[in-house]
Image (tube, helix red, strand yellow):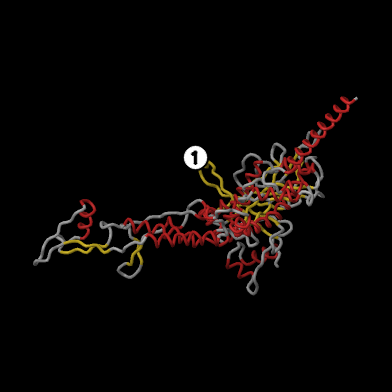
Amino acid sequence: MKSLTDVCRRLSEAGGFLTERNIKAAFPLENAAFIMPERPLEGDLDLQFLSWELGCWLDSPKRRWMETGEAYFAGRQDILQQQRQILGRDGQLEAVHNLPNNRLVNNQYAKLVNQKTNYLLGQPLTWECDRPEYAAALGRVFDRPFMRLLKRLGKDCYNQGIAWLYPYVGADGRLHFARFGGREILPFWADAEHTRLEAALRLFSRQLWRKGRLQTVWGAELFGPDGRQLFGWDPAKGRLTPWAWPAAGESGARCAYLSRQPQGADGGRQAFNWQRVPLVAFKLNEREQPLICRVKGLQDALNTMLSGFENVLQEDARNSILVIKNYDGTDLAEFRHNLAAFGAVKVKTVDGAEGGIDTLSVQVDAGNYQAILELLQRAIIENGLGFDSKLEHSYRAANELNIKSMYSDICLDANDLETEWQAALHDLLWFVNSYLAFSGQGDFFDCGCRFIFNRDITLDESEAIDNCLKSLGLLSRRSVVAQHPWVDDVEKELERMAEEEVAFADKATDRATGKAADKG
């Protein structure tokens, strides 16, 4: 591996800026491997290195798949660019505009993303901690807005393969979280497993008034272990420049992540940095591959078949193939116009042969289209590891075995996501624990915490309750209560049970005291 210092020195000798020619000149007999240093260097070579990395990433297949996933989820799919084509006189395909060209989108991909997100993240996340005060502190951080943010993060994860959370302390002194999509963040990993983040570059755009006009300004924000720094980004030249449009609280210089005013001090605010880069990666799978990679071809085929079926139905006698006999005219364009405008054309009899118009048409069997559309929809569900809700209605008795069979594919896919997210939440806890210690709410670094994803699955409640009753005496009360289908918050339910037991004991004591007084 080449250090960034050596890479920049040799590239500078080869011609200065990071171009393909300069790279080959600097490393004629070896492949150049770039790594971020422990401390980013200062100067133009840093900007050249980051500019080259950012330019390569923007044009990479991985980021294009991220853009495709977001576009398909929003309904902007390839079928909308489709044109009807025919064989031209030279044997090549050419576009035609006088034929029906329907562009229908049956967005099964968006349905699949929503289904998977709501299955795993539709219910609020819960946790079990070693200390009750730690659970209460986490409840103040992981509130309802955080649960909503987590669900949106899940959709980003399915569409882009990876999503990011940025923890920061707001002006109110509370810990907040910002959500970044995978297409916004260029990470610099310290290991091949992508578990230790060394630095990251975030691409963003802003609308600013410049010279009396509203213009889009592109920028990049570098997150490193010693703070963050803003740069300007020129898409045309592919270069990063110092940030030249500071807003309130912004500057082009490197700034710290945290700051606070010391108690009893009249001086400026004290600056602090996290000991880690404050970005947590939430991955869909170990390959960071978005869901669209598995189903794009099937989704395009579904849209094409549906649009083609509509095109065939709209091709009537006025715009289909016509066989003309003894037409009273010579201009076919005029013939088409008369047919479209008046619904009639003029024919004549020549040498005893009567004129007329016949049509050549292909009989459309709607059953064939319906069969293909159903096959494609089923293939999207199977390849996307989704859940076919129609199967649920086909079962007359929804017992536990049938339910598990219906949800087997989506459950397997959710297991992969949960494995990655458990690790991500563990990394996020480090920032939460640091904030709790920083704000004087307690030191919980040594406390254990287990997150529970409450999956939204159809249950046979009577069977689940019966199993809970049979488990009493074999398992702890907490474990039984946690598995009950009517319980959302285990801690609150246990508190209610304890209060009811105390109240029941008090009533029993009062009754015993009253009976003793009557006997006396």
Percent of width and height locating residue 469: 73, 48
Task: Check the picture and name the quadrant holding the C terminus.
Answer: top right
Front residue of 510/52: it is 510
In the image, residue 391 sits, relative to residue 435, either above or below, namely: below
Amino acid type of the residue that numbered disc 1 sits on in the rendered structure: Gly
For label 1, the residue is: 212
Percent of width and height locating residue 13: 65, 66
The residue lying furthest to the bottom in this view is 29
- Number of labelled discs? 1
The residue lying furthest to the front in this view is 519
Q: Is residue 30 visible?
A: yes
The residue lying furthest to the left in this view is 351
Residue 69 shown left or right of residue 440 in the figure: left
Percent of width and height locating residue 453: 68, 50
Q: Secondary structure at mark 1?
A: loop
In the image, residue 322 sits, relative to residue 27, either above or below, namely: above
Determine crowd level at label 1: few under 14, some 14-19, many 20+ residues with C-alpha closer than 10 A: few
Report which quarter residue 28 is drawn in. Answer: bottom right
Residue 122 shown left or right of residue 79 in the figure: right
Percent of width and height locating residue 337: 22, 54
Front residue of 41/371: it is 371
The residue lying furthest to the right in this view is 520
Residue at the spot x=11%, y=63% of the render?
349
Residue at the spot x=70%, y=54% of the render?
422
Front residue of 255/64: it is 64
Residue at the spot x=56%, y=49% of the render?
218
Residue 256 shown left or right of residue 77 in the figure: right
Task: Check the picture and name the quadrant holding the N terminus.
Answer: bottom right
